[in-house]
């Protein structure tokens, strides 16, 4: 089967890139798919994650004002698709243009849209203005219109189903990045969080919740890994809270698995999520997670008080109390970590990739009839 993924870039350290590196590689290596990845203005040949050597890449380069830009993109994309003549096309583009790819191409074959973020991505700092609300409403209407052109519209969680008024919806979660033989001892006095510094990730809320923890247990540290943004001013916030000596900010690292293994608690402070793959990664190492019950993902992954702790979204004091409960109870950490490791087996790459294979095969079988 010849499968094309249409994306923006695959060279970065983001979640979409990690997911694609796993499932596309497995489809090529285990299922013998002929996979092509079409990128847009990707100027970096070296990829952050490891992709199968069997994959083929096609980069489209465009520039100019918005009208010229989109015209060139459509023209070059059509040329690539006509040349490759795929059996199925999967679009992994969360931007507006991604919703109209079937229109741009004239739908030459079955097409699937993969939505990797929640509509909550439109949430801004502070109270949104009336104009922003109107723009968001128009944008969401456009998305629902474009989504109808796809054979299947894939979302990551059951919560995401509520966001869309479509009849072609289907849930397929992200696969685990790894499932190691070893796991964390849960003895290190260290908590960890992973993700780029942004309003979405809510590290301002995490730092405020961390203050009561280290006031009581100053020998614990919090390590935050992710693209650093000076605009978030997290250093300044940590300094003002008097906790800077117990918080470490690190840029993304390729060996993030080792960092999970060194941690005893994972904390997710996000205001919203598309899935929360970092939770499954930590849980694979037997690390119990404390997370805000934000839309959407954590409640799909964590069973409260069984393999982790869910806290009402925005309850900073509640997040502090939940972190403290795991700091103070090694037995609870151990039990929840053990349960967490078992629970995430449902996200093993071979299981998730098998779901994709069934979906792609069904589309091509229907086409051939």
Image: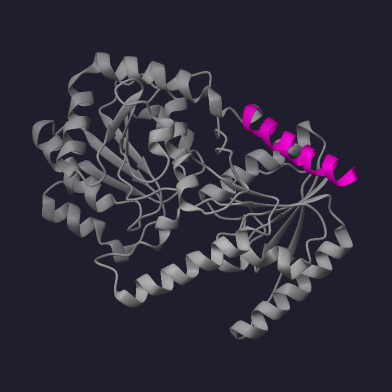
Q: Which residue is painted at 22% across and 31% down in the image? A: 323
Q: How many marks?
A: 0
Q: Which residue is painted at 19% across and 25% down in the image? A: 325
Residue 210 % position (x, y): 19, 41
The one nearer the camera, 209 or 215, is 209
Residue 59: say if magenta: no
Residue 9 % position (x, y): 62, 59
Q: Is residue 259 visible?
A: no
Q: Is residue 369 left or right of residue 68?
A: right
- The quadrant the N terminus occupies is top right
* Dominant secondary structure, magenta: helix
Write the start and end of the magenta stretch as one range: 351-369
Q: Is residue 77 above or below residue 169?
A: below
Q: Is residue 322 left or right of residue 93?
A: left
The one nearer the camera, 219 or 124, is 124
Residue 220 % position (x, y): 20, 32
The one nearer the camera, 192 or 357, is 357
- The quadrant the C terminus occupies is top right
Q: Is residue 319 above or below residue 164?
A: above
Residue 365 % position (x, y): 85, 40
């Amino acid at each position: 089967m010849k499968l094309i993924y249409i994306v923006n870039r695959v060279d970065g350290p983001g979640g979409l890139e990690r997911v694609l590196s796993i499932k596309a590689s497995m489809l090529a290596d285990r299922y013998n798919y002929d996979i092509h990845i079409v990128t847009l203005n990707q100027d970096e040949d070296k990829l952050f994650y490891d992709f199968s050597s069997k994959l083929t890449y096609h980069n489209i380069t465009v520039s100019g004002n918005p009208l010229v830009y989109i015209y060139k993109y459509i023209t070059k994309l059509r040329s690539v698709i006509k040349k490759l003549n795929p059996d199925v096309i999967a679009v992994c583009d969360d931007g507006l243009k991604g919703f109209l790819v079937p229109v741009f191409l004239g739908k030459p074959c079955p097409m699937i849209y993969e939505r990797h973020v929640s509509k909550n991505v439109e949430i801004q700092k502070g109270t949104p203005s009336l104009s922003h609300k109107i723009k968001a409403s128009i944008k969401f209407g456009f998305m629902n219109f474009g989504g109808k052109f796809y054979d299947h519209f894939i979302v990551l969680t059951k919560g995401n189903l509520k966001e869309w008024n479509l009849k072609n919806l289907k849930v397929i979660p992200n696969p685990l990045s790894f499932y190691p033989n070893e796991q964390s001892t849960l003895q290190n006095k260290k908590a960890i969080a992973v993700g780029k510094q942004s309003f979405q990730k809510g590290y301002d809320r995490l730092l405020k919740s961390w203050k009561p923890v280290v006031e009581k247990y100053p020998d614990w540290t919090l390590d935050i890994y992710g693209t650093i943004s000076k605009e978030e001013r997290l250093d300044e916030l940590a300094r003002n809270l008097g906790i800077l000596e117990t918080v470490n900010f690190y840029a993304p690292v390729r060996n993030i698995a080792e960092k999970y293994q060194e941690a005893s608690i994972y904390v997710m402070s996000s205001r919203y999520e598309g899935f929360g793959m970092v939770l499954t990664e930590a849980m694979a190492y037997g690390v119990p997670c404390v997370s805000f019950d934000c839309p959407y993902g954590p409640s799909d992954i964590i069973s409260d008080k069984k393999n982790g702790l869910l806290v009402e979204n925005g309850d900073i004091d509640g997040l502090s109390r939940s972190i403290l409960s795991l700091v103070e109870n090694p037995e609870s950490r151990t039990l929840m970590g053990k349960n967490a490791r078992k629970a995430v087996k449902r996200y093993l790459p071979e299981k998730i990739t098998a779901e994709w294979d069934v979906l792609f095969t069904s589309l091509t079988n229907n086409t051939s009839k």
